Image (cartoon, helix red, strand yellow):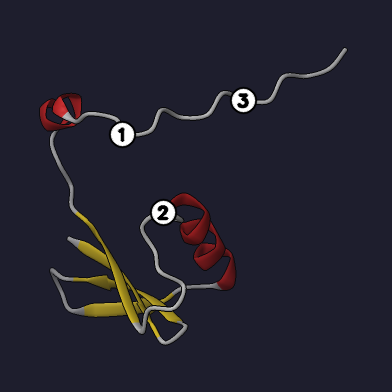
Amino acid sequence: MYIVCKFSGTWSLFNANNGISKPLQPQEVELIKELFSDDLRESAILDALQVIPISANKLQQLTVAHPAPAPPKKSS
């Protein structure tokens, strides 16, 4: 299991299996903010996202809360 942690503006990826933490690069932080914008609180002192591997069977049982946006149409 992995946990993405934000503590007072410092971001890291924590591996709960071996206890090792890796600081995230600015590009990685921006991507996380973009992908999980609804789940992060900018003013929070501590915020965390838990990442757990699941089997393909479990993935098929998940419901999608928000459908993925359609790609932009190219103008001719």
Q: Which of marks 2 and 1 is nearer the N terminus?
A: 2
Give the camera-side residue of 37 and 58.
37
Q: Residues within 10 Å of mark 3 (few under 14, many from 20)?
A: few
Cα distance between the residues tagged 2 and 3: 20 Å
Say what amino acid the circle numbered 1 marks.
Answer: Ala
Q: Circle 3 sits on which residue?
A: 71
The residue drawn where x is 37% and y is 78% is: 44
Give the image quarter of residue 46: bottom left
Q: Is mark 3 on a helix, strand or loop?
A: loop
In the displayed image of the protein, which residue is found farthest to the top?
A: 76
Say what amino acid the circle numbered 2 marks.
Answer: Asp
Say what amino acid the circle numbered 3 marks.
Answer: Pro
Q: How many marks?
A: 3
Give the image quarter of residue 67: top left
Quarter holding the C terminus?
Answer: top right
The residue drawn where x is 18% and y is 47% is: 53
Q: Which mark is residue 32?
A: none
Cα distance between the residues tagged 2 and 1: 12 Å
| Place of residue 7 in the rendered image (x, y in percent of width and height, measured from the top left) | 36, 84
Q: Circle 2 sits on which residue?
A: 38
Q: How crowded is mark 1: few (under 14 residues within 10 Å), some or many (20 or more)?
A: few
**In the visual, does 72 lie left or right of 16?**
right
Q: Circle 1 sits on which residue?
A: 65
Cα distance between the residues tagged 1 and 3: 18 Å
Q: Which of marks 1 and 3 is nearer the N terminus?
A: 1
Give the camera-side residue of 5 and 24.
5
Q: Is mark 2 on a helix, strand or loop?
A: loop
Q: Which of marks 1 and 3 is in front?
A: 1
The residue drawn where x is 17% and y is 60% is: 1
Whether tag 1 and tag 3 are in contact, CB under 8 A, the answer is no
